């Protein structure tokens, strides 16, 4: 049963509030002085406080209530406090709401509004606690792990990283799929950094940037004179990665001849440098990445099916940035590095833009905005993005606090459901909670 504490020197008011909330299933405690309130707070786990602003006869300025509020807020920062009084200054009310008071109710009060205010405050408290628990569980899941500086807030990335960390200690080949610029190399970094090979070499090869006639020499090495321009022996990437990990980005660009050699290395650990008959043996963990459909390439005869099964022992699918919108603003702030803040309009543009270039495009946009912005805040015009029509989207100031609380209440505290009802993203809902002074992680 949820417990409420009413702090009011007027006994009839305490009794009326006790009756009102008891009928709704709450357990209500009454304190007529601040001293009694502290005693009750020490004895019980109070979920919400209803606090009067004046506790002495003739007192109408609210100074006593103000002092008590700040003491309560310091001692119990997570407990919602609803202020109630008929005599106080509006400026003081505004100050205390900004300082963390959940709401202000004037006496005499409207029963339905008071009940709704309390219900919403308790729902939001429960939501905040759930979010804090999830955040603690997230930190616990990644405690002691090297995430290589990856920035994320979405559940999709959290699940992907948990799977990545689970695979990291094994030596099985991993294929990372996803569009260009989504961050496949970052996932590869996490795989190696948390593996038993983390102290060994981690060699990276961008297959898409290599000419086809140099790929084999790049991967397997070449003896002097093996081809035109090879004036000295060249150590290949497999040889350089011995004992560690080798990351082949855009593996779909490997020639069929190179695929045959790669298959042999994966099967036996053996290869020969170009121009040499000496067989060499290596122990390498292969991590591959591609933005192409390798199954379609197999059907076209452009990629070997047997190699596909070798490189794709386990697949990690990295979603595009527009599929994990909760990551957009955290990434943007990371790229801005605290040099400048984002205006509300800029945040809206960032969240609603489709990001065909994914994280890489977002990074470039933020770097350009830092150069072009002439103020301490990034404006939407600084981003250089199309001013997309935000049909069906909501502006920051067209959802008031009552609408926000009502949506959260109707959604049972489920943020994604409330956001969908309001026509905004989850991140935008969190931003409004912060804007209206509603506690959120």
Image (cartoon, rainbow, N blue to C red):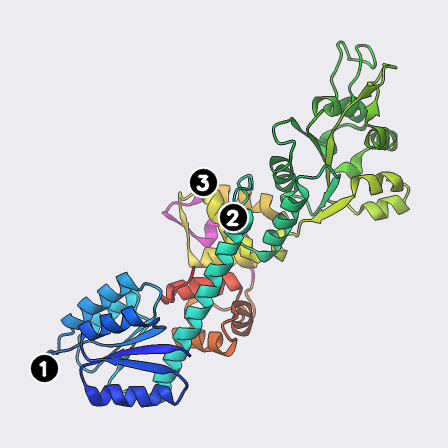
Specify the quadrant of the image occupied by residue 314: top right
Q: Position of residue 10 (x, y in %)?
A: 18, 85
Judged by depth in the image, the label closer to the viewer, 1 or 2, is 1
Q: Position of residue 212 (x, y in %)?
A: 81, 28
Q: Residues within 10 Å of mark 3 (few under 14, many from 20)?
A: few
Residue at figure coordinates x 16%, y 77% from the top left:
54
Residue bounds of the magenta highlight: 371-388
Front residue (pair 27, 74): 27
The numbered mark, 1 or 2, whose residue comes first in the sequence reads 1
Disc 1 and disc 2 in contact, CB within 8 angstroms: no
Check disc 1: other Cα within 10 Å, few if <14, some if 14-19, many if 20+: few
* In the rendered image, the vertical position of residue 27 relative to residue 168, given as above or below: below
**Residue closer to the observer: 395 or 182:** 182
Mark closer to the chain start, 3 or 2: 2
**Is residue 382 within the magenta segment?**
yes
Residue picked out by circle 2: 331
Which mark sits nearer the N-terminus, 3 or 1?
Answer: 1
Q: Residue at x 51, y 68 (%)?
A: 415
According to the picture, the residue beneath numbered tag 1 turns out to be 57
CA distance separating discs 1 and 2: 55 Å
**Which residue was labeled with disc 3?**
371
Say whether marks 3 and 2 touch (CB < 8 Å): no
For this view, does 361 lie left or right of residue 313? left
Quadrant in which the C terminus appears: bottom left
> In which image quadrant can residue 298 be found?
top right
């Amino acid at each position: 049963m949820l417990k409420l504490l009413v702090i009011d020197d007027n006994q009839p008011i305490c009794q009326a509030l006790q009756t009102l909330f008891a009928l709704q299933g709450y357990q209500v405690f009454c304190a007529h002085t601040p001293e009694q309130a502290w005693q009750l707070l020490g004895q019980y786990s109070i979920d919400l406080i209803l606090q009067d602003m004046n506790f002495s006869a003739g007192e109408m300025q609210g100074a006593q209530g103000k002092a008590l509020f700040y003491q309560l807020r310091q001692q119990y920062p997570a407990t919602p406090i609803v202020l109630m009084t008929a005599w106080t200054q509006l400026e003081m009310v505004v100050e205390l709401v900004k300082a963390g008071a959940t709401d202000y109710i004037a006496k005499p009060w409207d029963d339905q509004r008071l009940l709704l205010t309390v219900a919403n405050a308790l729902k939001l408290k429960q939501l905040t606690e759930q979010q804090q628990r999830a955040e603690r569980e997230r930190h616990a899941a990644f405690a002691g792990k090297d995430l290589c500086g990856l920035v994320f807030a979405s559940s999709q990335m959290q699940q992907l990283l948990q799977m990545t960390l689970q695979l990291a200690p094994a030596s099985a080949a991993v294929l990372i799929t996803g569009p260009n610029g989504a961050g496949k190399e970052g996932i590869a970094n996490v795989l190696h950094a948390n593996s038993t090979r983390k102290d060994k070499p981690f060699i990276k090869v961008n297959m898409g940037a290599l000419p086809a006639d140099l790929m084999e020499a790049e991967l397997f090495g070449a003896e002097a004179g093996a081809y035109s321009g090879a004036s000295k022996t060249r150590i290949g990437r497999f040889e350089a990665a011995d004992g560690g990990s080798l990351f082949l980005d855009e593996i779909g660009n490997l020639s069929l001849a190179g695929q045959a050699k790669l298959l042999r290395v994966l099967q036996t650990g053996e290869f020969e440098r170009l121009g040499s008959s000496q067989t060499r043996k290596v122990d390498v963990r292969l991590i591959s990445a591609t933005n192409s459909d390798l199954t379609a390439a197999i059907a076209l005869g452009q990629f070997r099916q047997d190699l596909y099964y070798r490189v794709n022992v386990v697949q990690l699918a990295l979603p595009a940035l527009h599929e994990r919108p909760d990551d957009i603003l955290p990434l943007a702030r990371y790229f801005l590095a605290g040099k400048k803040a984002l205006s509300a309009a800029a945040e809206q543009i960032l969240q609603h833009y489709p990001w065909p270039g994914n994280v890489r495009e977002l990074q470039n946009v933020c770097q350009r905005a830092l150069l072009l912005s002439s103020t301490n805040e990034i404006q939407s015009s600084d981003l250089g993005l199309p001013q997309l029509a935000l049909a069906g989207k909501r502006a920051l100031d067209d959802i008031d606090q009552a609408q926000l609380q009502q949506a959260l209440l109707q959604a049972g505290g489920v943020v994604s459901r409330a956001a969908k009802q309001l026509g905004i993203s989850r991140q935008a809902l969190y931003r409004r909670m912060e804007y209206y002074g509603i506690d959120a992680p």
